[in-house]
Image (cartoon, helix red, strand yellow):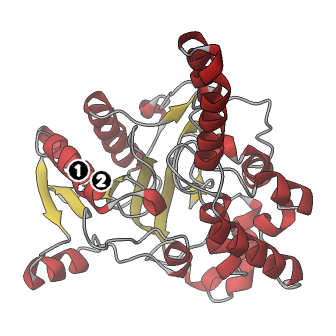
Amino acid sequence: MLDASVVPAVVFPRDLPYLNYFVARRVLSFGEKISRLRFLRSASNLQAMADKVTLMRLEEGFAKLENAQDCHSLLKKYLTKDIFYKLKSRKTGMGATLLDVIQSGVENLDSGIGVYAPDAESYTIFAELFNPIIEDYHKGFKITDRHPPTDFGDINTLVNLDPEGQFVISTRTRCGRSLVGYPFNPCLSESQYKEMENKVIQVLNSLEGEHHGTYYHLTGMTKETQQQLIDDHFLFKEGDRFLQAANACRFWPTGRGIFHNNAKSFLVWVNEEDHLRIISMQMGGDLKEVYGRMVRGVQILGKKLRFSRDSRLGFLTFCPTNLGTTIRASVHIKLPKLASDKSVLDSTAAKYNLQVRGTRGEHT
């Protein structure tokens, strides 16, 4: 599976406490001013800092990470002692802490990355950790680099990858999107899950033509519908141990669902790992048709929903591996001789910056 690019962060007004400070100076008498300003500053600091329990858990987690000799994650590589003590007390406007960022990597020492962004602002507040991880994973996307404006490219340059149908069983493209105004999974409340799902359903139900289809709530899904979606390889399950440890499966299955068009070639997963996973797929190797359908669907949805996008990092998602365009393209392909030796298959794929995955995606 090929990651096409990089992306992440919305900058929030970090000077708000000082704005309140100056407003207070103008309206309070001199006698009231000192005590009032002290209150404003202390309240602001409490809101912006992690609590004592969180700090204790962070210290324990960092110690575990430091002592893990067999851990080779990017989290361990870049969370130095200096960076840890610099970031450990920080908190985003939506309440996310460094613990929310690193808890999956601390719990799962075999992680390759080890971090998730609990909200869009995390990419800014915890930039000293995220930036080197992003640069390392995305092969040189430096802090001075900027993601280009959104451009899906010239679809007409794409072709059928296997016109004779000898090797490619199916082709799939997908991208992730996050809605402006909502945190990512670890910080979403139950009511926000429901609110977001309802907002997305209204848009999905308005789709026409090649994208017209049906939405299925995971909550209350009948056994017959569930089995049909399993047979179609559409149904996603509750997150793996990495997502579980990241607190990304709260209130499951509330607010989750699957949409697919009538032809079963265009899907939208709602509140799986990301707010939206937009997928196009079909049998065979016609990449032009598959990618074109996804692009047209994303463009329609983007006119009716506000997606989080940063001018430097591109589209923002839960995992820093899915940034920038967030687009990935994959083929289910028959390579029986090469696949007989997994190590040879992996090394061959690595030469072309490809990832080998099972039919059920990452970690399979």
Q: Residue at x 42, y 45 (%)?
A: 178
Q: Residues within 10 Å of mark 1 (few under 14, many from 20)?
A: few
Q: Nearer the viewer, residue 62 or 240?
A: 62
Q: Which quadrant of the figure has residue 116?
A: bottom right
How far from the left and from the top, in percent, is residue 176?
44, 49
Q: Residue at x 57, y 24 (%)?
A: 20
Q: Residue at x 62, y 49 (%)?
A: 46
Q: Residue at x 77, y 65 (%)?
A: 75
Depicted 214 relative to depicted 219: above or below:
above
Q: CA distance from mark 2 to mark 1?
A: 5 Å
Q: Nearer the viewer, residue 138 or 62?
A: 62
Q: Which quadrant of the figure has residue 346?
A: bottom right
What's the residue type where badge 2 is placed? Gln
Residue 163 at least partly seen: no
Depicted 36 relative to depicted 52: above or below:
above
Label 1 sits on a secondary structure element that is helix
Q: Which residue is label 1 attached to?
A: 195
Depicted 95 relative to depicted 273: above or below:
above
Residue 318 left/right relative to 114: left
Q: Looking at the rendering, in which quadrant would you find the N terminus?
A: bottom right
- For the image shown, how many numbered marks are present on the structure? 2
Rendered image: mark on residue 358:
none
Q: Nearer the viewer, residue 242 or 136?
A: 242
Most extreme residue toward the bottom is: 340
- Are the residues flagged by discs 2 and 1 in contact, CB closer than 8 Å? yes
How far from the left and from the top, in percent, is residue 149?
55, 24
Residue 54 left/right relative to 360: right
What's the residue type where badge 1 is placed? Glu
Q: Which residue is label 2 attached to?
A: 192
How far from the left and from the top, in percent, is residue 17?
61, 30
Label 2 sits on a secondary structure element that is helix
Residue 343 at least partly seen: yes
